[in-house]
């Protein structure tokens, strides 16, 4: 009987871009993707929380991932896309620059976060997948939507 090749575990990620970088979140964490929504500001909220949106009667916090990851501010006039994610029993919106596609990757392309990444970003990035000539940063959706510091997890 011929030997079978070992099965490679694969995962599917929804990809998006932020400041020219490619990111991905596991497909099962995504509830929906929405075009830009008007937001109500939240006084005294962390700077990464840019407002609240009304999602069919549910009030959802909108977290700007550029700010959360310490990237440059979005250029004036550029409207973000809302990626609505589920974490534990909560729903939040992550603001991203542009949606990509769904990609399926194997564990053989995965590496831990680069040592050169700053400490705050390393908390939110699980690792990277090599996709041809690009790196897809795997975002920890649970930690990205937490509004309190995540160092003590």
Image (cartoon, rainbow, N blue to C red):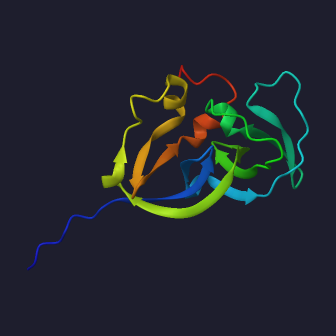
Q: How many marks?
A: 0
Image coords of residue 14 (percent x, y): 57, 58
Q: Is residue 19 left or right of residue 117?
A: right
Residue at x 81% of width, y 25% of height: 45
Depth check, front residue: 22 or 120: 22
Q: Is residue 79 above or below residue 132?
A: above
Residue at x 55% of width, y 25% of height: 120
Depth check, front residue: 75 or 41: 75
Q: Is residue 99 left or right of residue 47?
A: left
Depth check, front residue: 123 or 69: 69
Image coords of residue 109 (percent x, y): 34, 53
Image coords of residue 32 (percent x, y): 71, 59
Which corner quadrant holds the N terminus? Answer: bottom left
Image coords of residue 97 (percent x, y): 69, 49
Q: Is residue 123 left or right of residue 5?
A: right
Q: Quadrant of residue 116?
A: top left
Residue furthest to the left: 1
Residue at x 73% of width, y 31% of height: 48
Depth check, front residue: 41 or 75: 75
Residue at x 46% of width, y 39% of height: 126
């Amino acid at each position: 009987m011929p030997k079978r090749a070992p099965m490679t575990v694969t995962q599917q990620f929804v990809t998006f871009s932020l400041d020219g970088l490619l990111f991905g979140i596991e497909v099962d964490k995504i509830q929906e993707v929405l075009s830009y929504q008007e937001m109500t500001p939240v006084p005294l909220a962390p700077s990464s929380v840019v407002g609240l949106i009304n999602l069919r009667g549910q009030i959802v916090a909108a977290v700007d991932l550029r700010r959360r990851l310490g990237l440059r501010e979005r250029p004036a006039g550029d409207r973000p896309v809302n990626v609505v994610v589920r974490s534990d029993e909560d729903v939040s919106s992550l603001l991203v620059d542009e949606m990509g596609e769904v990609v399926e990757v194997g564990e053989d392309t995965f590496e831990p976060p680069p040592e050169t990444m700053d400490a705050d970003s390393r908390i939110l990035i699980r690792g990277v997948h090599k996709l041809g000539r690009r790196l897809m940063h795997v975002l920890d959706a649970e930690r990205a939507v937490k509004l309190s510091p995540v160092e003590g997890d």
